[in-house]
Every structure is written in structure tokens, then in C-alpha cells.
Image (cartoon, rainbow, N blue to C red):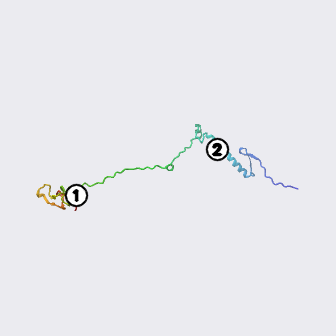
């Protein structure tokens, strides 16, 4: 009986690779061995560099302290600037409400200078157009028992020829007065303009 042995893969010598790991060389090397070496070798190299960088820093990231020698070796350190906007502050705390109050005093309405009156006492002498307005006036009559006397005159001289018209009323009466005339009234009730 004869036995056949399956063909054996060709055996190649291994060379020492980086880090003392033996890695097969040549075209017959399977692809997964190469990947394994790249995977673990890369991780080891990166770990070594990070450890060297942390050790060279000399300061603590938590405390932020460093020595003067560290500053000369590492060079300038970055500066962090924090800027808060008004919008961020508005979200944190509501802005206070400001109310301004101004007191305004109303100015009195301008009134016309008191002009000539449209009603006046039943005793006295008045200049029409200056003291009283021109127009037609009415009285209820005498204030007492002797009658109500009124007089229209050209001037205030009191002379008989200055009288334009006059009357002595025992009841109600009316008189029309023109501008520039003088009007005298005695023992009469109040005169009121009616036209």
C-alpha cells in the first residue's frame, strides 16, 4: 500500500522584523499575517508617541501649571478666549424692565382778553364798544319803586344837548346801543344783551 502525502507549502526562512517580531518574507506569505503586523505595530507606535508627548509636557492638564523650562521647550501655548453674546446673557437672566415716567403739566388755554361785557349792572355809566358791546339790551325793570332811568349820550359831559335818547321805565324795557355812545343807568335791574 502506498500513501500519498498532500503537498506541503514551501517553507521560507523568517527574517527579524521591526520590534524583534519574526515575519515571513517572500511571495508565499499569507496576506493576513501582514495585516496583523500593521495593526499591532501601528497601535504600539502611536501609544509610544502619545506617552512621549505627555511626559515631555511636564505640566498637568487639570491644573494648568507649567515650569519655565517647559515654556522654552514647547514654544508658545494657545490662548482661549470666551466671548459671551448679549443673546446668551438674555437667555440666562431676563433683562430688567425700565419704565420712564414724565409728568406733563397741561398749559392753560389761552383766553382772549376780556372784551366788552354783554351783561352789566343797572347802576353806572358805560362806554359802548369799550365797557359793553354794542347791541340791543333788555332789563326786567326798576330795582326799587321810583322807576328805572336810562340815557344814551354823545359824551360824558352831562350837558342837556349831549343826550341822544332817554327813558324812565316802570316795567321791562329795551334799548339799542351803538359803538362810541355813553350809556347811563340808575335804579334798574341787570341789563343783558339780546341781539
Q: Is residue 118 left or right of residue 68?
A: left
Residue 184 at least partly seen: no
Q: Residues within 10 Å of mark 2 (few under 14, many from 20)?
A: few
SS class, disc 1: strand
The earlier-in-sequence mark between 1 and 2 is: 2
Q: Are marks 1 and 2 in contact (CB under 8 Å)?
A: no
Tell me residue 17's x, y (percent).
72, 45
**Hey, which residue is sitting farthest front in the picture?**
145
**Hey, which residue is sitting farthest right in the picture?**
1
Mark 2 — residue? 50
Q: Residue at x 69, y 49 (%)?
A: 39
Mark 1 — residue? 119
Residue 36 at least partly seen: yes
Q: Nearer the viewer, residue 19 or 103?
A: 103
Q: Residue at x 62, y 40 (%)?
A: 56
Which numbered dot is residue 51? none
Q: Residues within 10 Å of mark 1 (few under 14, many from 20)?
A: some
Tell me residue 195's x, y (percent).
22, 62
Q: Residue at x 66, y 45 (%)?
A: 47
Q: Nearer the viewer, residue 116 or 110?
A: 116
Q: Nearer the viewer, mark 1 or mark 2?
A: 1
User: In the rendered view, would you say 32 is above or below 141?
Assistant: above
Q: Nearer the viewer, residue 75 or 57?
A: 57
Q: Is residue 21 left or right of residue 71?
A: right
**Disc 1/disc 2 C-alpha distance (Å):** 112 Å
Q: Is residue 7 left or right of residue 62?
A: right
SS class, disc 2: helix
Amino acid at each position: 500500500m502506498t500513501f500519498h502525502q498532500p503537498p506541503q507549502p514551501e517553507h521560507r526562512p523568517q527574517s527579524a522584523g521591526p520590534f524583534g517580531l519574526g515575519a515571513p518574507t517572500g511571495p508565499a506569505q499569507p496576506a493576513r499575517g501582514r495585516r496583523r503586523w500593521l495593526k499591532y505595530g501601528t497601535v504600539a507606535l502611536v501609544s509610544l508617541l502619545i506617552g512621549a508627548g505627555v511626559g515631555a509636557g511636564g505640566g498637568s492638564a487639570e491644573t494648568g501649571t507649567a515650569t519655565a523650562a517647559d515654556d522654552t521647550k514647547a514654544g508658545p501655548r494657545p490662548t482661549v478666549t470666551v466671548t459671551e453674546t448679549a443673546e446668551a446673557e438674555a437667555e440666562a437672566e431676563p433683562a430688567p424692565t425700565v419704565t420712564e415716567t414724565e409728568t406733563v403739566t397741561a398749559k392753560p388755554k389761552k383766553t382772549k382778553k376780556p372784551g366788552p361785557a354783554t351783561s352789566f349792572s343797572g347802576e353806572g355809566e358805560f362806554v359802548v364798544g369799550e365797557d359793553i358791546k354794542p347791541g340791543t339790551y333788555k332789563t326786567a325793570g326798576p330795582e326799587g319803586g321810583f322807576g328805572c332811568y336810562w340815557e344814551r349820550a354823545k359824551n360824558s359831559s352831562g350837558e342837556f344837548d349831549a343826550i341822544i335818547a332817554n327813558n324812565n321805565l316802570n316795567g321791562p324795557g329795551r334799548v339799542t346801543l351803538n359803538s362810541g355812545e355813553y350809556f347811563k343807568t340808575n335804579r334798574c335791574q341787570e341789563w343783558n344783551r339780546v341781539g
